[in-house]
Image (spheres, rainbow, N blue to C red):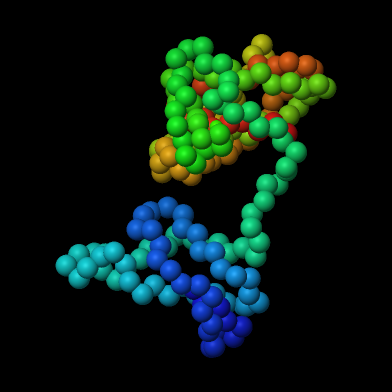
Amino acid sequence: MEASQDAVTWTSVQSGVMPSARAVQFVDFPAVNARYLRLNVTSTWSAANAPNYYKKLRIDEVWTGGEYARSANTEGVSYEAEAGLLPDGAKRVRCDNCSGGLKVQFPGRVLLPVVAPLGGERVITVVGTAEGTKSFDVNVVNSRTTERIMLTGWSSSAPLIGRAVTAKLNPGLNLVSITGTADLDRIVIN
Ligand SMILES: [Ca+2]
């Protein structure tokens, strides 16, 4: 990775070997004042006998940030899926990328007790993983509406994907019920 103020003189800011894998790749480099960044790819996994891939690298998008990403709202309360009630055969499984190191796999159902002293409209962010396009159905028990959330990922182990819905909570104790075809790490209530 090189940086430049004028696209003429370039200074190296980082170098390394990326994992030979699809999906998002991160390049962490020291903060620099620059107008331009460029990525020099010096080699790929492919050899000359695979001409479709040799010396070729496909990049969909490049995003650059000047600071580490932070949560937009840090006041949410997290409820781990694995800490919930699993009345219908959903399974707790290990998940190295998940918070708490565990997630829940469906079929089945997760019931999470959520206390909302004042009740009212709240944002529920559902965090999980999906290989392909999967869904969660989120329902506050005893309310009539079920929100369906779609999420698309490339692996059931990473990355974690968060999707938000709004739901009306009752003052006091609520039960949030989640079923689906994706794997559930946790929910966050804001
Ligand atoms: Ca978890």
When asked about the image quadrant of residue 189, the answer is top right
Residue 66 locus on image (x, y percent): 65, 65
Write the residue at 61% across / 83% down: 5
Q: In this view, does 112 lie above or below 128?
A: above
Q: In this view, does 161 lie above or below 57?
A: above
The image position of residue 31, as x and y in percent, is 63, 71
Residue drawn at (46%, 58%) of the image: 25
- Left of 98 or right of it: where is 122? right
Task: Count numbered badges in the picture.
Answer: 0
Q: Which of 39 and 61 is in front in this view?
A: 39
Q: Is residue 190 left or right of residue 12?
A: right
* Quadrant of the rendered image containing residue 28: bottom right
Q: Position of residue 104 (x, y in %)?
A: 49, 26
Residue at point 56%, 78% (across, down): 3
Q: In this image, 116 relative to 179: left or right?
A: right
Query: Where residue 79 appears, x then y in whole percent?
Result: 63, 28
Q: Residue at (51%, 21%) from the top-left corner?
A: 179
